[in-house]
Amino acid sequence: MGAYVDSREDHRMDDRVTIAVMDAGIGLLAAAAAVRHLRPDADLVLSSDPEGMPWGPRTPRDITARALAVAASAAAHRPQALIVACNTATVHALPALRARFEPDLPVIGTVPAVKPAAAAGGPVAVWATPATTGSPYQRALIRQFADGTSVTEVPCPGLSDAVEHADQAATGLAIAAAARRTPEDVRAVVLGCTHYELVAERIRAAVRRPGRPPLALYGSAHAVAAQALRRIGRPPAPESRADGTLTTILSGREAPLPASVLTYAQGRLLLRAAGAVSPA
């Protein structure tokens, strides 16, 4: 255990809810917005690493080092829980993050929603980054939670980067290419990268099949937000007065969110709820 100091007593005294959310980039918006929906009164600390992204091509050791640094910046603000809103960081850095911060600071990882998608009945497609598609990590999830269900792994090259930079044309091209690789008979699509949840409706439209019911999309944001609240013993309170604050940390320094977040409903929600109007 490092030098992280338990501040839960301080939180009990003022009864505030403070949740930190971390990622390499703006993929954290989906989980942060889910927390805001469940607890409008929660103070949010968003910590990302724009100077070091993307994390996917980096070595596991480098990903872990950068994830620990991003988490430490968030922990300095004394949250009660830390959401790792990144599949790559969860795969490579979750054990190190938990060793460093738990039990004082619960750390909640993000796992693609293969289990609920398979439970609802297949066939299922899992959209993920090329690095994750076919990886031992994803294959293990499919074996564990989708045994007996037809699952197609669909790589989505360029999609997360296009979403990160709010490049609408590149996002559309990447979605269309992934939709062509998605079998006609699938009934559900698992969004295996947190960035994909920001463009869920564009994905839904792209995979819509004439004469068939709309496909179900399965993301992880709501589940990880609910799990974070469970871990700290604070149930959802969607009717709470919306007075939660928003603190954003970019590569270790407090700074406004990039203007690209305004492209996405989740980003607009967070800024509106926090009274922020001028991202960088």
Image (spheres, helix red, strand yellow):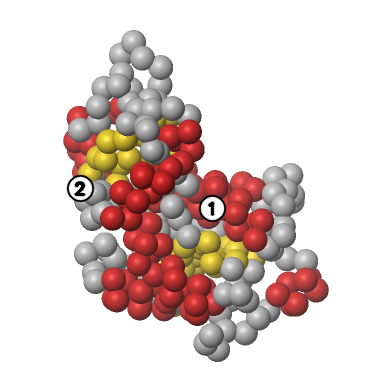
Q: Residue furthest top?
A: 211
Instruction: Say whether residue 56 is visible.
Output: yes
Q: In the rendering, at what x and y percent does residue 123 appear?
A: 35, 28
Q: In the rendering, at what x and y percent does residue 122 appear?
A: 38, 28
Marks 2/1: CA–CA distance: 25 Å
Q: Secondary structure at mark 1?
A: helix
> Mark 1 — residue?
224
Quadrant containing the C terminus is bottom left
For the residue pair 230 and 71, the one nearer the viewer reads as: 230
Name the residue located 35 percent from the left edge and 74 percent from the top edge. 64
* Amino acid type at image mark 2: Pro
Earlier residue among tags 2 and 1: 2
> Along the horizontal axis of the image, is 210 left or right of 198?
left
Instruction: Say whether residue 270 is visible.
Output: no
Name the residue located 72 percent from the left edge and 52 percent from the top edge. 235
For the residue pair 22 and 166, the one nearer the viewer reads as: 22
> Along the horizontal axis of the image, is 207 left or right of 274?
left
Q: In the rendering, at what x and y percent does residue 10 appear?
A: 74, 77
Q: Secondary structure at mark 2?
A: loop
> Mark 2 — residue?
157
Q: In the rendering, at what x and y percent does residue 192 appear?
A: 36, 47
Q: Residue furthest right?
A: 13
Q: Is residue 88 above or below residue 111?
A: below
> Along the horizontal axis of the image, is 179 left or right of 102?
left
Foreground: disc 2 or disc 1: 1
Residue 217, located in which quarter of the rendered image?
A: top left
Circle 1 Cα neighbour tier, 10 Å, few/some/many (<14 / 14–19 / ≥20): many
* Amino acid type at image mark 1: Val
Name the residue located 23 percent from the left edge and 36 percent from the top edge. 178
Q: Is residue 3 above or below residue 227?
A: below
Name the residue located 48 percent from the left edge and 29 percent from the top edge. 120
